Image (spheres, coloured by chain):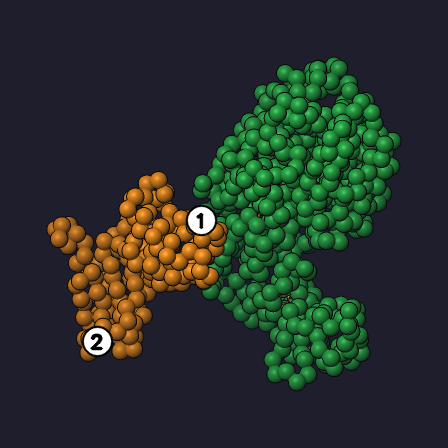
Chain colours: A green, B orange
Amino acid sequence: MSMIELTIDNKRIKVDKDSTILEAARQAGITVPTLCYLEGVHQVGSCRVCVVEVKGSKNLVPSCITKVQNGMKVITNSERVRNARRTMVNLLLSNHPDDCLACAKNQKCELQQLAYQLNIRENPFEGQPSRAVYDDSSPAIIRDSSKCILCRRCLTVCNSVQKVSVLAPLGRGYDTVISPAYGQTVMEATCVQCGQCTTVCPTGALVEKSYIEDVWNALADPSKHVVVQIAPAIRASIGECFGYEPGTVLTGKLVGAVKALGFDKVFDTNFTADLTIMEEGSELLHRISSGGKLPMITSCSPGWINFVEQFYGDILDHVSTCKSPQQMFGSVIKTYYAQKMGIDPANIYSVSVMPCTAKKYEARREEMQSSGFWDVDAVLTTRELAAMINEAGIQMDKIDEQNFDIPFGEGSGAGAIFGNTGGVMEAALRTVYKLVTGEELENVELTDVRGLKGIKEATIRLGGRDVSVAVVHGLGNIREILDQIREGKSPYTFIEIMCCPGGCIGGGGQPTPTNHETRKKRIEGLYKADRNLEIRRSHQNPYVKMIYEEFLGAPLGELSHKLLHTHYRDRRTVQ
Amino acid sequence: MSVTLKQAEQKDVELVDRIISAYEGQPGSLIPVLHETQKVLGFLPRWAQDRIAQRLNISPSEVNSVVSFYSLFSEKPKGKYCIGVCKGTACYVKNSEGIIEKLQKELGIEVGDTTDDGMYSLEVLRCLGACGLGPIVTVNEKVYTRMKPEKVRDMLRDIEDMEKRGE
Ligand code: SF4
Ligand code: SF4
Ligand code: SF4
Ligand code: FES
């Protein structure tokens, strides 16, 4: 790393020669406002909110894309700079709806924060409102283009990170609207509902569809028995909405807060993560021993399921038939649990808290009614749950820790790490090893499949043979692996795929910002949760044993088949 | 309203395929392919854009983005009556813009667009060399001279009459 020296606001600083002015300023403790810039992901310099003066250059330069030079003299805070920034933001505001009070992004909107930061009080410009397309076709995400500032972050994420390429700018100039092709709705287009675009959109133009009202209504209805399941990834991220460090594991407080909201029972999705491992592990062994389709691919990530159905519908028989833990939970609640508790399943309202928008879509797939009802009635994202906790006036730092409710309150460490990339693989192998060899895997930590590399590989010695596995996260990384399968050249036996970068801890329903830093810390949080648990293998979860004894029989049995497994559809539009 | 590939005429599909084949593998081939396709089909139906996207291995949204960006590309077939307004300098100074605005209002479409019933489309013409008679408006082969915004309604009534008489 070679260093250069420059002056920013009369401060001499040394930085790496490849830094941008913005990075250098931040290093020197100087805040330069930004809007379109998204560190490491989207750096195109289009909004020009980050402009600064550079001695010797006639025009102001956007600091987020301009590299430093030796001896450069930068001024970040002159009258000229302030006026230019204010003009840029005023122009954006001139055609923006005055809707902050009722906007889903109120208080979290970057445009709003910027207007505040730049002391904007009145706007000299009056613009035509931007072209308004309101698309609420999807049960997962809502597009409101009237609030779009054309920063194009969503395009970068959808096209370059996820490589689903649904969104594009249509039209030109003032009429430009960010949209799926041909002005289709997201449901008509090949959108996989991953919601990654909603985590990067700075404004209220792309947000999750909210089910908060539905859940409040159910909680207020005395005839309803309202249960909630909380996904593994939530405990390591929800703290961020209340000022905790990313990765702080808040399981006890989270349960306490959710109980205070008035839910009748608070359960842990880790329990059905363990159940998934029992079914999926057994399915893998069955495929290996009976000459079934291999490699087998995990099925717990509904964004990935949407992707494979829409783009690789010809290899669906490689995908495990296991439902996701969310949906397993749903069908178990309205059958086994209802029977056990003597409650009419028609009166059970089943809520799940997920880090994910695609789970909202999954819950509304028509086949997800194997209990005879919607198995899951409403899905809330981490962000929505935090909003409900706020609305109820519950203070996270003051609330007492509580335990999940029995019988679905116990999950193993294997269930906890379901929330991060590599976790399902690691959890599955802990159990498969036992199923194959009859012995427990000594060292449960499989470091080869940990970390944020896009594609991870490992080879495991299992019952006298070497088994190759792969772990992939972020849809942008998977085509290579799927093309191998298509061509019959896949070297793997078992593949874990998670739709979102980092896995569920980086899901489309997670707190903002979700970036490399927060992903890493949340993952560390989950591994810590795993280490702190006594039971770290799914097959040792006593309640999992109990549900098989009392109700399901054996993995892959008839009831499992009906309640815990599903099928997929080839939904390719081009072949 | 969009036509899917299955419904598209086999011979049109072959024509488009031939155009794509001629450019396949060359960088920057999207625009020329779209151009040639519009030349043979008259416009760029959705099935053709999908086809081009698939064969050139780019996403439909990217193709559609380019198509919707350039006003020379059209996603709708020309209307039965194609109205062209000259925006050459002479016509322009004699208020052809006012005529365009009036037409847009009356027809409820923008320049480059076609009404949903497929009857009218509106486009801008470059100088026809009849500047002395401007502003010039054409309806298919018919030419209206010395047009004014106030005369737009009469002209549209003219077209309706033509339609009724089945000309
Ligand atoms: S997007 Fe931001 S600025 Fe626009 S209405 Fe919502 S909160 Fe206000
Ligand atoms: S939800 Fe995912 S696939 Fe759909 S538009 Fe957003 S980023 Fe693209
Ligand atoms: S939808 Fe959001 S992220 Fe996408 S361009 Fe508009 S403001 Fe930016
Ligand atoms: S933040 Fe630098 S140009 Fe937008």
Snapshot quadrant of residue A98: bottom right
Query: How far across and how far down the image is residue B53, in percent?
Result: 44, 51
Q: Is residue A177 visible?
A: no
- Left or right of B106 in this view: A291: right
Q: Nearer the viewer, residue A571 or B87?
A: A571
Q: Nearer the viewer, residue A294 or B70?
A: A294
Snapshot quadrant of residue A208: top right
Q: Nearer the viewer, residue B13 or A373?
A: B13
Which quadrant of the rendered structure holds the N terminus of chain A? bottom right
Query: How far across and how far down the image is residue A35, in percent?
Result: 64, 63
Of mark 1 and mark 2, the one earlier in the sequence is: 1
Label 2 sits on residue: B129
Query: How far across and how far down the image is residue A120, in percent?
Result: 64, 68
Label 1 sits on residue: B54
Query: How far across and how far down the image is residue A100, in percent?
Result: 61, 55
Report the chain holding disc 1.
Answer: B
Amino acid type indicated by mark 2:
Gly
- Left or right of B161 in this view: A157: right
The image shows residue B46, relative to residue A439, as above or below, that is below
Q: Residue, x 35% and y 55% (percent of image)?
A: B19
Amino acid type indicated by mark 1:
Gln
